[in-house]
Amino acid sequence: MSNLKIALIQGVIVLTPTYSIAFLTDKMIWTIPMLVASGFIAASFKNDTAEKKTDDDREDHDIEEG
């Protein structure tokens, strides 16, 4: 359920400024940069802890000693 909440918050972060700029300026030239900028902010909102995968299944004969 928390992923849905985060997605909704990210959507609000992106869509609110973008539609506000589109409505206030009535020009598309300001909408695209606002969409990109707010997208960066929304992406940094989620605390994503990705696990690094290591290859621990290698066999001893794969490593040659010289």
Image (cartoon, helix red, strand yellow):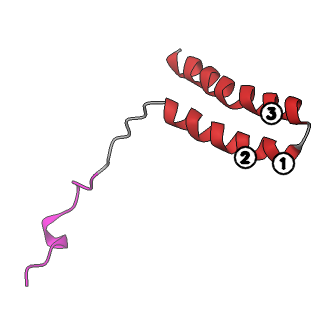
Outermost residue, top direction?
Answer: 1
Q: What residue is at 72 percent from the left and 40 percent from the top?
A: 35
First in sequence, mark 1 or 3: give its number: 3
User: At which x and y percent is residue 59?
Assistant: 18, 63
Give the spatial CA distance, label 2 vs label 1.
8 Å
Q: Is residue 63 magenta?
A: yes
Outermost residue, bottom direction?
Answer: 66
Seen in the image, is 2 located left or right of residue 51?
right
- Type of amino acid at the residue the image marks with label 1: Ile
- Type of amino acid at the residue the image marks with label 3: Ile
In the image, residue 1 sits, relative to residue 24, either above or below, namely above
Majority secondary structure in the magenta region: loop
Q: What residue is at 87 percent from the left and 44 percent from the top?
A: 28
In this picture, which residue range is highlighted in magenta? Answer: 54-66
Residue receiving disc 3: 21
Residue receiving disc 1: 29
